[in-house]
Structure formats: C-alpha cells, structure tokens
Amino acid sequence: MAKTVGFSAKGGSVTGAMRQFLKQLLEKKLVAAVLVPLELPSKENVVQSLVTQAEVLDAADPLAPVLPVTTANIISKITRLASSQKKVAVVARSCELRALIELIKLKQASLDNIILIGVDCFGTYSVVDYKQFGKGTQAPGDQFMKGIKAGKADPRLREACQICEYPYPLVADITVGLIGSDFDKELLLLANTPAGEQVVGSLGLPEAKAEGRQAAIDRLVAERVKRRDEVFEQTLAETKGLERLTSVFAPCIGCHNCRDMCPVCYCRECVFDSQTFAFEADKYLDWASKKGALRVPTDTLLFHLTRLNHMGTSCVGCGLCQQACPNDVPVFRIFRLVASRVQPLFSYVPGRSVDEPLPLTTFKEAEFQKVGFE
Amino acid sequence: MSDEKKDGFEPTIVGYLCNWCTYAAADVAGSSRLQYPHNIRAIRVMCSGSVDPLYILRALFSGADAVLVSGCRPGDCHYVSGNYKERRRMIVLKTILDTLGLESDRVWLRWVGASEVPKFAATMNEITEEVKKLGPNPIGSAWSV
C-alpha cells in the first residue's frame, strides 16, 4: 500500500506547506530542479518555471487556480530530444498528468528521471478571471483553498473543471492529497511508486492516514458527473444535426488556436497546414460552382471533425481548447461529449496508464466482428 | 443503366479500395463483364488501413453521397493488421457522426477478397440501392459548412 506521510501546515497555509515540501526536495538534493507554477509579483498570473534555487520557491503557488498552459507540453518540450541524467520534480494537476501520459504513448515526452508530484485539483479559473482574482490578494492559492474549505460553489471555475471526473491524479509518484483532508493543518503526501517512496521516505516525516479521502473523492466526483451529464444534454440539444452544427461553428475563424493549445494534438505539421490543403484558384471556383457559393475560410467544420477523429480517443477534457478560442465556439463541450462516446468503445481512459496502448494504434481480432459483414 | 431509379437520383459513391483485394475484385468484375452500378468512383489505395477519416470526410464535404472503404477480410491483410486498425477508425468515425447527428449511414466499410468477384458486384448494388434511399448528401450541397 502507498506510504502516506503528513507535512504540517504552519499558520494554516497550505501553500506554505507546499513550498516547504518542495524546498526540501532541492535542499536535500533529492532533485536537481522543480517544475512548478510561480506567482508573478503582481499576482495577476502564475508561470510554470523550472526552479533550481530553493529560495525562489517562496513564490511557488501550485494551488493558484489557473492553468495558462499545460505542463504536459512543457515536459514534452524539455524531454523530447533527450532526458536529463538529473532528476526533476514536476508539480502538476490531474489533467496535465493525463495529457502527459498520452504524449508519452505518442512518443513525444519521456518520464526518465522525472518525479511526478500530482496535486489534487479543485479546478481553475480562466486566465482572464484569474487576473481579477489574483490582483487583490496576497496569497491566491491559500485564498482559493479557503473558499474550497468553506464548501461554497465557485461559479468562476472553468466549465471543464466543473465537469471533470478526475480531480485526483491517476498517475503520479507522489500525490498531494487535498480532497477530504484538513489541508490547512497538515499536507498529506501519498507515495504511489518506489521512486515516490524513496523521496517521501527521505523527508523524515511522521506517518499519516488519508482517512475519508476516498469517500470525499467519491462525493466530489458524483457532483461533477451530475453536472457533466447536464452539460452533455445541453450540448446535444444545441449542436445535434447539420443545421445546428453549422451555426455552432459559424463563428470559427479557422485560427486553429484550439489545436495549438490541445496538449495531445502533437503533429509537427498539421495536415490542415500542409500542402494537402493548398489548392489552386480553379479548385475553389469548382467547389463554389458546385454549391452555388463557398464559405471562406473553407473547411472549418471539416477541421473540427478531423480533430475529433484524430484526438477524440485521447481527449483528457482539460478545456484549454475552449480557453484558446477567441469566439467562444463550444469546442470543449463538443470534444468532451464526443470523447464520452468514443473512449468507452475501447474501455479507454486517456492518461490512466502508460501501459495501455492508444486505441487507434492497436486492435483485437475478436471485436466489432459484425462490422464489414452487415 | 438498367436499374435507373424513378426519381433519377444517381448517387456518387467514392470507394477507397484496397489494392490487394477489393480493387483486384473490381478489376476482374470489369474484365469478366459482370455488371455493377456505375455510381462507384474507385480510388485504389495500398491498404484499407491507409484511409484516414479525413479522406472520408473530405469526400462527403465535397459532394460524395457516400463513401465506401473496402479491404481484405479480417486475418487476410497484406500488411497483417491494416484492416483491423481501419475497423477501429471507422467505428470511431461513425460514433462521432452519430453523436453529432450527421448521417453515419453514408459511410461504409466492407471486406471483399480478391477472388470474391460476385460479392463485389453484389456489394456495389447493395450500397447504391441504400444510398438512393437516403437521397442526396446535404453536406455536399451546403455552402455554409
């Protein structure tokens, strides 16, 4: 079973306890660097940073409720060419870790010498909302967690977070257990792997029990699933059918921001940016004369449908596509809805395990056997 | 054509046919003067597993009334497992179309071996008849998509 230890939160500050914990990793030379969000002095945003000096971690705020970019992409960027021989601790939320696992399976990132520290996540605000929230506060992470402790519904949470069924890390060496715990008194560290146990064991902390954690997770997940199903219903009502889809995607300007921010959309050159989609004028005129008119930019719905086919099985529901859309096209809602139908076909949960193959790279002989013979 | 429909609608069906089986069957059907509907526009591909859903969607968006992907029977793939992988892609594509309320019955997957010449003709007849019942593909004529 997982080894669990408690890290006392002095002065009731969970962020303070996180900082002390991360500092010890550097001070005890357990890792060479920590990748963690740092508060900007203005508190208007956080930026993920690779920290090598312990005192810089006084600005660390992994609980600040904002996700400007996903750590999955950062790890991919850092490890794609070659991993380091030195150990790096990575502090990330569940959706970031899940996306990272997908990228590893897509051979876009490596976990060599990476210690994953997964933090229970109560959700994040949009970057714009966070700016407002952070500006007026000294310790945004603590402030947010106080609200969570009080149990108030927070309408500023992004919809992606409100309907996320994975508030806890699925894959991590160490889980920072916040759900159902008295995090303002004690920070729970759950070691899930031998590497995690080694780190946690080196801190000399007293054993602790994560009592009530599972029950609290179940309650939180049940709430979110309920909300999720409501969103699915609404999305179906608003988007189903060619006519509705056409108007839902009408504001799409083909900027492809959703693709660029998607943590698992990984192709260096997207087919939509390639010569495959470069046509001569006569081709456009040909299409226009067939249909009487041709909407330009062309292929906006085709783009989204193609992305659904390519990425739907790996969508982790982080909602960054939505955050990136300049025109509020409900890309996230549609992806999440479609993913909820596609992923169960293969009993696949993206980011659940490095060992489960990506559904579209594998097959079973004895499945869908009627297909092709009907 | 002998089986011209009363309303005169002749669907355009794009067929991505595997070089090693269905395309060969189509070839033999032609040279042995076996009749099958002219609605199919055959495109030879090296494997059914090489057909990305994008090619299928592109055909539908460009005015095809239906798209057929036809490959080797399960277990017979020239490249061992291309057809099994295509089967998964097609299931995903159809599920997506169904979820969004688009017509998934315009997308067809069939296994037709190189020697199954009569089956090829029968399959083409079947698809043509079914697509005639569906009528023209609305996506193909909508300027706004």
Image: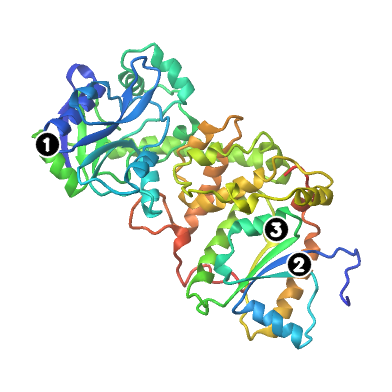
Of residues A287 and B75, the one nearer the viewer is A287
Asked which quadrant contains residue B51, the reply is bottom right
The answer to whether residue A242 shows anywhere in this view is yes
Q: Is residue A27 above or below residue B114?
A: above
Residue type (three-letter) at the residue carrying disc 3? Ala
Dot 2 falls on a residue whose secondary structure is helix
Mark 2 packing: few (<14 Cα in 10 Å), some, or many (20+)?
some
Asked which quadrant contains residue B41, the reply is bottom right
Instruction: Please check whether the numbered discs 2 and 3 fall on a single chain.
Output: yes
Mark 1 packing: few (<14 Cα in 10 Å), some, or many (20+)?
few
Q: Residue furthest left?
A: A204
Q: Is residue A253 above or below residue A146?
A: below
Which circle's residue, 2 or 3, is located before the other in the chain?
3
Dot 3 falls on a residue whose secondary structure is helix
Instruction: Please check whether the numbered discs 2 and 1 fall on a single chain.
Output: no
**Percent coordinates x, y for residue A90 in the rendering:** 28, 38
Dot 1 falls on a residue whose secondary structure is loop
The residue wearing badge 3 is: B59
Mark 3 packing: few (<14 Cα in 10 Å), some, or many (20+)?
some
Label drawn at residue A207 = 1
Residue type (three-letter) at the residue carrying disc 2? Glu
Q: Residue furthest front?
A: A280
Label 2 marks which chain's residue? B
Residue at image point 20% right, 48% down? A193
Foreground mark, 1 or 3? Answer: 3
Of residues B133 and A194, the one nearer the viewer is A194
Q: Are marks 2 and 3 in contact (CB under 8 Å)?
A: no
* Colour mapping: rainbow
The residue wearing badge 2 is: B130
Q: Give the number of marks.
A: 3
Residue type (three-letter) at the residue carrying disc 1? Glu
Of residues B43 and A242, the one nearer the viewer is B43
